[in-house]
Amino acid sequence: MIDVYGRSADGRTILLEKDDHAGRSVVDFVRCSYLGFDNHPSVIAGAVAAVEQYGSLHWSCARTRLNFGLIGDLEEDLSDLFDAKVITYSSLLAANMGALPLIASGHLTGGRKPLMVFDQFAHATLAFHKPVVAEQTRVGTIPHNGLEELERLCQENDLVAYICDGVYSMGGAAPVDELTRLQARYGMFLYIDDAHGISLFGQQGEGYVRSQLLGAVGDRTIIAASLGKGFGASGGLLMLGTAHQENLFRSFAIAHAFSASPNLAAVGAALGSARLHRTPERDVRRRKLWDNVLLFDSILPTAQKGEKLPIRVIQIGDEHKAIAAGRVLLEKGLYVSVVFFPTVARGKAGLRICLTASHSDDEVRQVAQTVFEILDRS
């Protein structure tokens, strides 16, 4: 059920290549390429063309020393697409690793170090940095989407920075409207990781969070996002609001000062996806994605039913029963994620299903009906 090896085929089909499953094909509900761009011909062609054009894949030096010109082209393109100052990274983890200590330092907030408040369900790539952030300033954690607790902390502290996801990997989303109201009232700094929302929302695919912000990003909001997942390429990015922030990140963020840039295949793939984002195909695929979500919900209601989000979680409870359910699905040619502690709380094990635009109606019906039958038998 883990460390499965294979290669992509048509649509969401995976050809398995190792161990007992070698030679089998399964329909994948694990990958987060919600628009199906990760094996789109334009994205693949972009990756190949970039490597051929520059005759290299990777330059082994820090970004403060040397960058491929194509990375500058990508960042300009994404800045225009998302109406923000965009810096790209080799991964979203690298982006978060550079951003959170800078926020904690107070250099983005006029020299005042904020209380860094994490949502209880903030992704592991955010929560992992709490000990480093705690070297700079105080750190706290509040219940998931705990707006009352967050407002109390804003009232009791000189400055609060709130760190959360935009769309959560186990379903649900941040209350962006309420957060921006708290920001307007108390001057709160917002750092939101919108990895699962990018490309799915907004006129230009700017994501769940950016599409709800009126006007510019501003100097008290940073949005992190993935160039994988909905965007279909590889890497991560930050959407910044000011030139001052951009200069600080390019000079002092860990992934700039002490690590290398995204490799050229990733850059070329992202440029290919950016071109797709400016075509009608993006909206065609988004409509198909939401049709698939509605179809799934009509067969198998979950706690996320009715949410215009692509992730559905079926809670089973017992870890062993969840693993057994995942095995039954795999034997039927359907590969889904089995989630249990520490990904979710003890006793909350279940199945996570990522729906995409590339799934056919029959594939969506099959996975929903099969899970329904497994739950009915148990």
Image: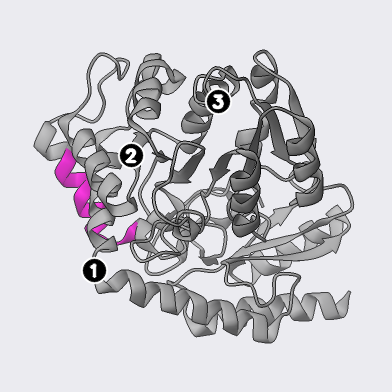
What's the residue type where badge 3 is placed?
Answer: Ile
- Viewport quadrant of the C terminus: bottom right
Q: Is residue 182 magenta?
A: no
Q: Secondary structure at mark 2?
A: strand
In depth, the one of 12 and 208 nearer the eye is 208
What secondary structure is marked by label 3? helix
Image x and y of residue 9, in percent: 38, 63
Q: Which residue is mark 2?
A: 85
**In this rendering, position of residue 372 left or right of residue 20:** right
Q: Does 291 appear above or below 151?
A: below
Distance between mark 2 and mark 1 Cα atoms: 22 Å
Of mark 2 and mark 3, the one earlier in the sequence is 2
Kindly identify which residue carries mark 1: 279
On the image, which quarter does residue 131 sit in?
top right
Circle 3 residue: 103
- Cα gap from disc 3 to disc 1, whole angstroms: 36 Å
Q: Residues within 10 Å of mark 3 (few under 14, many from 20)?
A: many
Question: Is residue 146 in sight in this rendering?
Answer: no
Q: Measured along the vertical axis of the image, is residue 6 above or below residue 103?
A: below
Q: Which residues are magenta?
A: 39-50
Residue 179, above or below 322: above
Earlier-in-chain disc, 2 versus 1: 2
Query: In front: 135, or 5?
Result: 135
- Choose mark 3 or mark 1, whichever is in front: 3
Mark 3 or mark 1, earlier in chain: 3
Cα separation between marks 2 and 3? 17 Å
- Which secondary structure dominates the residues rendered in magenta? helix
- Amino acid type for the residue under numbered disc 2: Lys
